[in-house]
Image (cartoon, helix red, strand yellow):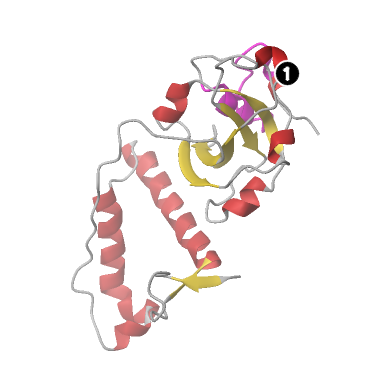
Amino acid sequence: MSWSPLDEKNPSDDTLIGDEPFDMVSDCFRKVVRLYKRDLKRKPSLREVVGTVQAVLEAQLKDHTSDGESAELASLTFRTRKIPKRQKYAKGDILKALAANGEPVYGRVFDPQLGPQWKGSDFGPFVGVYDSLGMDQSNLDAIIRRPLIVKVFPIHRENLENREWLVIGHRPLTEKDRKHPNGPLQIAGSNEQLEAASYYYGLGPKTFYNIEDCLVRK
């Protein structure tokens, strides 16, 4: 269990956030999403999520917070901003997608070690997938310490630009990262890395003929 400042830019602020509370709240939101999908066939809107949190705190502030003894919740607001139409990415970026069972799985944009015959060829970006099904994104370092289950091979740029894999963080590539096994030098319009990961975990079918060549079997 670890605790860190809620506002790292303000050293005088003594409010804290913990990794286990983060995991518990994240799990709660996942359950809420499942209920919306079950009954309404869609994910909740941000307004619906915030409204639910506000309703709970209004009714139970005293039960759940130290402030509740002397205050009541007057309002809970949020702000959004538009994200760029095309997601940008770079080598070392850590990626998140949802496997066929709805759980998160994580990959990374790698710098592959290609033979001299491929130098100058534009295959990129190259993505491999970690053995990370169901892990929480709050600990990126734990994710990238996991072994690969899907080898490093090219992915169609649109899969990243359209956020089929979401960039959630960045860590500089190390020499060890450059020694991960390469998969076939092929690019398809489908999301082959995600399909291969789902297949590896027994969550999806064999969607392309050489899918086994893309996997790191133990």
Q: Is residue 118 left or right of residue 54?
A: right
> What residue is shown at x 39% (from left), y 69% (from top)?
9
Q: Is residue 74 magenta?
A: no
Q: Is residue 217 left or right of residue 129?
A: right
Query: Quick one: quadrant of the N terminus?
Result: bottom right
Is residue 102 visible in this depiction of the protein?
no
> What residue is shown at x 54% (from left), y 42% (from top)?
94
Disc 1 packing (10 Å; few <14; some 14–19; many ≥20): few
Query: Quick one: quadrant of the C terminus?
Result: top right
Q: Is residue 156 left or right of residue 48?
A: right
Within the image, what quadrant is residue 78 found in? bottom left
Range of residues picked out in magenta: 191-211
For residue 80, above or below residue 25: above
Q: Is residue 84 left or right of residue 6?
A: left
Q: Which residue is mark 1?
A: 115
User: Which sits in the foreground, 120 or 160?
Assistant: 120
Q: Is residue 200 magenta?
A: yes
Within the image, what quadrant is residue 113 found in? top right
User: Which sits in the foreground, 32 or 160?
Assistant: 160
Estimate the x, y position of residue 43 in percent, counting from the top left: 34, 41
Is residue 29 visible in this depiction of the protein?
yes
